Image: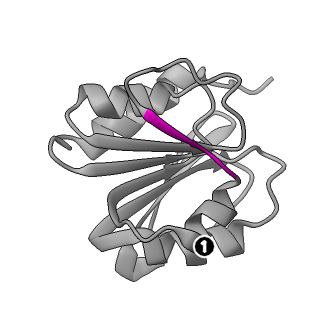
């Protein structure tokens, strides 16, 4: 039996790794309920959340753009210091996501992808938490 951490374990690990992010811009892709957005805002970032549905998003003080993530990234002109993405595990367009995210990162920006630990994207840094993993790339590494 494998241990699957709760999302709070992965969230805690993510923000421990990121450290002090106050004053940075943060883009939360596939934001779902907005828990990552909420934590980023509490840590002093300016946050934008993007998800195809607003059904589960409960935060009134964070802007949510209701859109398909890939479509949003194709037309977005704003740059972000940190981009976090937690696509559904059945997501199949990681190659497109990586290309589009690179265009949306600010210089020296950081992209963090949460995904199944079974997947490997050759990220310079990958941390595994049970069945979940976080992969990290700086803009120049994508």
Q: Say how many tags the image has.
A: 1
Residue 50 visible in this rendered orientation of the protein = yes
14 or 48: which is nearer to us? 48
Magenta span: predominant SS is: strand
- The one nearer the camera, 103 or 115, is 103
Question: Would residue 122 be visible to someone looking at this image?
Answer: no
Q: Position of residue 85 (x, y in %)?
A: 56, 50
Relative to 57, residue 118 above or below? below
Q: Taking 94 as reference, is 25 left or right? A: left
Q: At x 52% / y 28%, what residue is drawn?
A: 34
Check the image and report above or below for 9 versus 70: above
Tell me if 95 is positioned left or right of 112 in this view: right
Residues in magenta, as a range: 63-67
What residue appears at the point 38 percent right and 66 percent down from the top-left corner? Answer: 78
Q: How is the image coloured?
A: one colour
Task: Kindly identify which residue carries mark 1.
Answer: 74
Q: Position of residue 55 (x, y in %)?
A: 71, 24
Residue 102 location in percent, x, y?
A: 47, 75
Residue drawn at x 71%, y 54% is 68
In the image, residue 64 lies in the stretch drawn in magenta: yes
Find residue 89 and report its image quarter.
Answer: top right
Look at the image and say whether residue 132 sits in the magenta stretch. no
Quadrant showing the N terminus? top right
Where in the figure is residue 35, as x and y percent of width and height?
49, 25
Q: At 71% from the left edge and 35% from the top edge, which residue is drawn?
A: 53
Q: Is residue 98 left or right of residue 13?
A: right
The crowd level at tag 1 (other Cα within 10 Å; few <14, some 14-19, many 20+) is some
Q: Residue furthest bottom?
A: 140
Q: Is residue 120 above or below residue 54?
A: below
Secondary structure under badge 1? helix
């Amino acid at each position: 039996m494998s241990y699957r951490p709760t999302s709070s374990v992965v969230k805690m690990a993510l923000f421990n790794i990121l450290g002090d992010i106050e004053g940075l811009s943060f883009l939360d892709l596939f934001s779902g309920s907005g828990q990552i957005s909420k934590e980023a805002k509490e840590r002093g970032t300016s946050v934008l959340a993007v998800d195809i549905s607003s059904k589960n998003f409960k935060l009134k003080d964070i802007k949510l753009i209701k859109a398909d993530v890939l479509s949003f990234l194709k037309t977005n002109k704003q740059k972000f210091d940190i981009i976090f993405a937690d696509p559904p595990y059945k997501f199949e367009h990681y190659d497109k996501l990586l290309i589009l995210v690179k265009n949306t990162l600010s210089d020296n920006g950081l992209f963090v992808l949460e995904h199944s630990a079974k997947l490997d994207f050759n990220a310079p840094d990958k941390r595994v938490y049970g069945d979940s993993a976080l992969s990290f790339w700086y803009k120049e590494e994508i």
